[in-house]
Amino acid sequence: MSAEVFWWSGFLIALGGGAIVAWALFIRGQPKGRRRCPRCWYDMAGAVADDANAHICPECGRRIVKAGQLRRTRHFWRLAVFGLSLVVAGAGLWATPMLRAQKWQRHAPSTLLVMLADADGVDPISETWGELFIRARYGQLSARHRTVLSERLAKRFSAVQPSLGTLTLIHELRPGRSNALAERISMFITAWEKRDERIMDGDARVRWWSDNSHHAVAIEILGRVGSDEDVETLSTLLHSPSKPNHDRAAIALGRIGGDAAIDALTEVVADGSEQVALTAAVALALIGEPARERAEPAIAVRLTRTLGAEERVVLAPSLSVLRGEEAHISIPLMRLFIEGRMGVELVGWEYVAGYQFIGLLREDAMPSLPLVMSYLDDEDPARVDLALTAIARFVPVATEALPVLDELPAKPDANPSVQFVISMLRRPD
Ligand SMILES: [Zn+2]
């Protein structure tokens, strides 16, 4: 029986018990206009007062001097005791999981944890936040809760000190759509751009967008919140002469979806260079059914006038995925795409970032795990962070990374996220 069941059943039983107590003592025995003997509760509606203005109960003989006593509320003590025992039993049930395990957070309802998770002292390895992240990872946290927590984390973004770590945590939570969040992340991006003290226009901006890995993370989050402005920026990036730039822009649009993104992608499939057209086709496949009506003819036409093997390998499966014919091939398709196309330009760490970016670190990407693990020792803390996030994404299949991770906390300047990732990997069902 899950902890949540204990919590709620205990709570409901105690609540029911409380209601019974109240009913037994105050409601059930109300006189409701009746006049009754306060001792035996015999109905004395017809009783007449004697000379001394007193009533005599014909049933038990009690003499009632004050008329008010005839209108007393009867208390059902046995029922009240029964209700009280339910309150005690419910409270016991409610507390059982907590008593059995020291970490009460593990057994607390998510609503309570979300209420307790403090915005100012966000510490991903605190018990409360850690539990929430684990629940998010295992799909046990509602979209509403994930969004609320993300918005709270995003409040830490300021123009003074934008935090990549915070961005990564928001990314981990996979928040739902939220204007507040989109606004904050846009602020984060602006702050980073300013920090680089470069004039961000035209190609410089385009390059900057694709050169900064935290942007990949921001784009991926925006893929779930996507503002019109983001779609517009990314649509412009589609026409960048640089291949990594337009590739990333296309995939980001594929994650965002929506009419504007579909239109921009369909346009380059129809008229763009072969390079960007292929990526756009994959992105449209990512969007899937909502893109079908507009994208299908464009990809089909492109396929008829494309002769190269590589193009066919990308276009044909994209079309199938879009038509919903072979949705299961979408992941191998994306992987083929990265390894066959992006892979030739990305080496090592960037390759890991690419996987991370496109969200492919799942079971089918297991062969990449040793490569990802090799970055746990990197001198650059940002790379270690990303490798950790990547490993966390393999959950629950990356347990073979555990022995390596177990060594890490012993090092003097060990990354505090290590323990957190270990706890995620060790999470039993
Ligand atoms: Zn009586």
Image: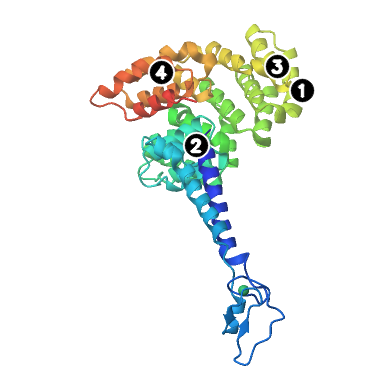
User: Marks 3 and 1: which is nearer the front?
Assistant: 3
Does the residue at mark 4 contact the one at mark 3 (Cβ under 8 Å)?
no
Q: What element carries label 4?
A: helix
The three-letter code of the residue at mark 3 reads: Glu
Secondary structure beneath dot 3 equals loop
Looking at the image, is mark 4 or mark 3 earlier in the sequence? 3
Considering only vertical position in the picture, is 304 above or below 102? above
Q: Horizontally, is 134 left or right of 44 in the view?
A: left
The residue labelled by disc 1 is 297
Q: Are marks 1 and 4 in contact (CB under 8 Å)?
A: no
Q: How far apart are marks 3 and 1 (CA)?
A: 18 Å
Residue depicted at 66% across the width and 23% down the height: 285
Secondary element under disc 1, as helix, strand or loop, is helix
**Residue placed most toward the observer, 11 or 211:** 11
- Residue 362 vertical position relative to residue 209 in the rendered view, above or below: above
Front disc: 2 or 4:
2
Using the numbered discs, state the Cα–Cα distance from disc 4 to disc 3 in whole angstroms: 32 Å
Residue occupied by mark 3 = 326
Question: Tag 4 or tag 1, which sits nearer the N-term?
Answer: 1
Rendered location of residue 27, percent (x, y): 61, 66
In the rendered image, which residue does mark 4 sit on?
A: 349
Q: How crowded is mark 4: few (under 14 residues within 10 Å), some or many (20 or more)?
A: some
User: Residue 278: x and y, percent?
Assistant: 63, 18
Label 1 vs label 2, nearer the camera: 2
Give the quarter of the image for residue 388.
top left
Q: Earlier in the sequence, mark 2 or mark 3?
A: 2
Kindly identify which residue carries mark 2. Answer: 3
Sooner in the amino-acid sequence: mark 1 or mark 2:
2
Q: Whole-Å distance between the Cαs marked 2 and 3?
A: 39 Å
| Amino acid at circle 2 | Ala
